[in-house]
Image (cartoon, coloured by chain):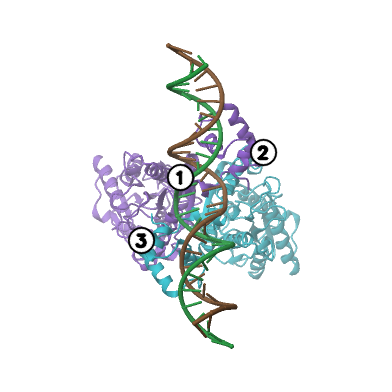
Chain colours: A purple, B cyan, C brown, D green
Amino acid sequence: MATIYDVARLAGVSPGTVSNALNHAGKVAPETEKRILEAIEQVKYVPNRMARSLKTNRSRSIFVIAEDVRAFPAPRILDGISEYCHEAGYDLTLFNLRISPEIRNFDYGLYLGTQRFRQDLAAALAQAKSLHTCAVIYAGIYPRDMGNVFPPLDIPVAFCYTYSHGLPSVNCNDYTGARLAAEQLLKTGHRKIGVILGKTDALPTRRRLSGFADALGERGVTLPPEYVAGGEGWSYEDGRKACRRLLCLPDRPTAIFSMSDVMAAGAVHAAQDAGLCVPDDLSVHGYDNYEGLSFFRPALTTIEMPLGEIGRRGAQLAISLSEGRAPEKTDVLVECRLLERASVAPPGKG
Amino acid sequence: MATIYDVARLAGVSPGTVSNALNHAGKVAPETEKRILEAIEQVKYVPNRMARSLKTNRSRSIFVIAEDVRAFPAPRILDGISEYCHEAGYDLTLFNLRISPEIRNFDYGLYLGTQRFRQDLAAALAQAKSLHTCAVIYAGIYPRDMGNVFPPLDIPVAFCYTYSHGLPSVNCNDYTGARLAAEQLLKTGHRKIGVILGKTDALPTRRRLSGFADALGERGVTLPPEYVAGGEGWSYEDGRKACRRLLCLPDRPTAIFSMSDVMAAGAVHAAQDAGLCVPDDLSVHGYDNYEGLSFFRPALTTIEMPLGEIGRRGAQLAISLSEGRAPEKTDVLVECRLLERASVAPPGKG
DNA sequence: GACAGAAATTAAATCGATTTAATTGAGGCG
DNA sequence: CGCCTCAATTAAATCGATTTAATTTCTGTC
């Protein structure tokens, strides 16, 4: 590998001048610069980032800790992070916590309190320190407060799809997202609308519920307590069970807003099992735009979360922070988007 | 940040001794080591990887170039790579080429020949060189030969889910994978079996076809030319069209082997549109275990590709290479696994 | 008690860049 | 012509680790 000394010798200048040509445009005479550039080309010189970072104490690298890189939502967030980092000239080191699917579904909340999780996180952060990374991005699989488990750190941190005390974070606006769903169902003509909640104690559940109820209320539509089902979790089975409950009601809803697509899929199947056709007899509105259901029939009308944007904004936040620019807002909320597809139709057709 | 000098001063030794304690077990007297370890603990010393790598000229890092980190199969491959790297004490720098979904579906082959792709790849490799990364892993979205576009490199490279001339690579065994599917259909009692091909010129298509035909042949079952459909692409629509064709046959097959799950989904819908019930009237066997169809009903019987394993073996290969150990095999094929689900049943029930 | 040899430790050089302070050279002006 | 200024360049120090060669300390033996 060619070094800056090789380039300097070939161009007949000192290493300092080569460095100046590379890093401080205008400090070197044009014809000298030209000679240097030619020499660089000739010996195929690529600066050694180790040496540079050692001297400058700035690595131009971002350290991403992902809870589970394999599954939704991580890949899309990672894509956004990677895109922004690339544009900003940073490179990206990835650390996957590898929270297994079993843990995700069954004892995720518990897991975060375990010794094992703390150790893995500590190992990740030690690696980040050791690499003298400019900033850390923590990308969660679930919006929640990491306050109890994230140790204080002397490197700037941004949280994507999670948050932690007052630290910078980027999340979806669940309140307005749920409003979009409500408005869509109202617009389509529904007045008797049921809701399938996510896990009750989860923040997104509460925010989505309040957005949804507010939007209904503004149009004079009430949400009776018996129309609100679910609350145990986010799974297919949860959605199925909750939908069955709603369908047993004497005056059953004509539409259901499910707080996740996976639960919506369960709800659709429950309706079908009860002999109902979706959307003709019952409309089902999802949330997430979960890619695991891209071939689901009927195609789910849903709320798309801008995960790529979350990653991009997270990276932006992290890089601003590391460059000493204080961001104007540390708690960024990005807006969701309605995707009109086939699972919502006017009521009373069937 | 504490340095090795701080530790040395606090422990009353020289920096060299601290370094020895850390890197050459047994070279330092036990009680000295204990003092050093305490000092490290006390000042929270974490070695500076820049400085270490600069001196040793070994970064203990792996550079992963992914064609599209957002979508199948990259996340699962990345997970495997990340797992192995972590175990081996390497860190992982990610570079996403960001091949967009439109390009993937329409002019992917063409795209690889473009100036733009070459430039992006060159940028990635320059970054890898600049970071003095130990090895590069190229993770494709599609098994094919990168020979025409991958420039010669002075860093070891391993290819995952792609290959390049005689360079080390890890792929799925398409031949035995397709045999598994054939054996499953035969075992279930089918004798009239149609095939929906992937893109004709793709290597997986040819390998899967020959495995499938061989397995049938060994049991005395022939694969008449009119039972082989598709060949244009891998999409839902391709599967749908191909299935329609097969169902129009005078003596239509009782089972169909589709070379991708997405095409299998199209095939199932084509059968349903033709008034057939899957699996009672027609069995459909998929390939890939594509997660986008995890909620598809009927659940697809399919061949699972061990993508995590591909990543793990790729990382293993890359790290062996970088440490100067020549791997015994440079063209690794990992075995697929049959997933029995609901879309395959004995014939003649309907 | 002297001395060889082994064990433990250290001083100093080094990796490849950046940066500061010093130096050189050119041009302008009285 | 001499002096000052400004631009361009360079020499040398530095970042924080590892490593080599040198040095010190310790042990055992005759």
Residue B24: x and y in percent read: 52, 68
**Residue type for callout 3:** Val
Judge if badges 3 and 2 mark residues of a common chain: no
Tell me the SS state at disc 1.
helix
**Residue type for callout 1:** Thr
> Which residue lies at the image location 66% right of the left edge and 49% below the top edge?
B153
- In space, the residues marked 2 and 1 are separated at their CA atoms by 27 Å
From the image, tell me which residue sits under label 1.
A56
- In space, the residues marked 3 and 2 are separated at their CA atoms by 46 Å
From the image, tell me which residue sits under label 2.
A42
Residue B98: x and y in percent read: 54, 44
Tell me the SS state at disc 2.
helix
Q: Are marks 3 and 1 in contact (CB under 8 Å)?
A: no
Q: Chain of mark 2?
A: A
Q: Earlier in the sequence, mark 2 or mark 1?
A: 2
From the image, tell me which residue sits under label 3.
B43
Q: Is residue A245 left or right of residue B182?
A: left
Mark yes or no: residue B208 visible: yes
Q: Is residue B133 left or right of residue C28?
A: right
Question: Mark 1, residues whose alpha carbon is within 10 Å: few (<14), some, or many (≥20)?
Answer: few
Q: Is residue B81 left or right of residue A97?
A: right
Q: Chain of mark 3?
A: B
Q: Are marks 2 and 1 in contact (CB under 8 Å)?
A: no
Choose between B23 and A213: the one closer to the eye. B23
Mark yes or no: residue A304 visible: no
> Which residue lies at the image location 69% right of the left edge and 64% below the top edge?
B329
- In space, the residues marked 3 and 1 are separated at their CA atoms by 22 Å
